[in-house]
Image (cartoon, rainbow, N blue to C red):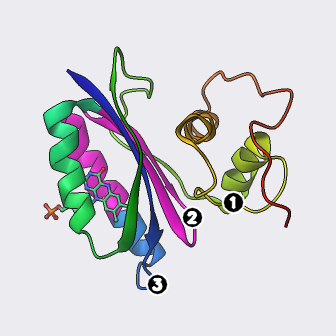
Amino acid sequence: MLNRLVYYSERDRSCSDEDVTRIIARAAARNRPMDVTGLLVADKHCFIQILEGPRTAVSMIFQDVMRDQRHKNVVIAECSEIEQISCPRWGMARLTDPTKIDAAWNRVARRGVFAPWPLNALQLRALLRIAIGDAVTPPREPLFAAAPA
Ligand SMILES: Cc1cc2nc3c(=O)[nH]c(=O)nc-3n(C[C@H](O)[C@H](O)[C@H](O)COP(=O)(O)O)c2cc1C
């Protein structure tokens, strides 16, 4: 049985860019042999992660992630059974470049600053799909109205 888990969290102040590099290396090494794939968006202040794969494997990984002191206030935005994996099977892709994060954000929200909290599961997934560089046709209208800056 395949599952998709999407969460966001607050990046701890102590979590350096080197830590993020280490996390991604760890995730890439561990997830792929477990048939888990996904994407980690690492902003200065928050993380968004999508994990897709066999239910037990996704759960095992997520339990470790939940305990990790490099972030806090983990919020599950989506946990669902899926027919097939939507992320390429790369283990763990990353999006850490602020310019690219902003570009993905602008395609979804068109205004305001990047933040996962106001997004529902569908909007978050749209953001992640854009981030993944999937063939998503940009919506004609913003998928939601961001709070005025
Ligand atoms: C935001 C975030 C995302 C993470 N994602 C993964 C992941 O996808 N896979 C993984 O194995 N570890 C991930 N980690 C690291 C785990 O929390 C944990 O440190 C690691 O699995 C422990 O491995 P070790 O005890 O063998 O060093 C993540 C950590 C953070 C803070």
Distance from the alpha carbon under mark 3 to that under mark 2: 12 Å
Q: Residues within 10 Å of mark 3 (few under 14, many from 20)?
A: few
Looking at the picture, which amino acid does disc 3 mark? Arg
> Going by the image, does 57 lie left or right of 71?
left
Residue at point 47%, 73% (across, down): 17
Q: Quadrant of ligand 1?
A: bottom left
Q: Position of residue 63 (x, y in %)?
A: 19, 55
Query: Which mark, residue 114?
Result: 1
| Range of residues picked out in magenta | 23-52
The residue indicated by pointer 3 is 13
Looking at the picture, which amino acid does disc 1 mark? Phe
Residue at point 44%, 78% (across, down): 16
The residue indicated by pointer 2 is 43
Distance from the alpha carbon under mark 3 to that under mark 1: 18 Å
Q: Residues within 10 Å of mark 2 (few under 14, many from 20)?
A: many
Residue at the far bottom in the pictured view: 14
Residue at point 57%, 71% (across, down): 44
104 relative to 10, above or below: above
**Dot 2 and dot 1 residues touching (CB under 8 Å):** yes
Q: Residues within 10 Å of mark 1 (few under 14, many from 20)?
A: some
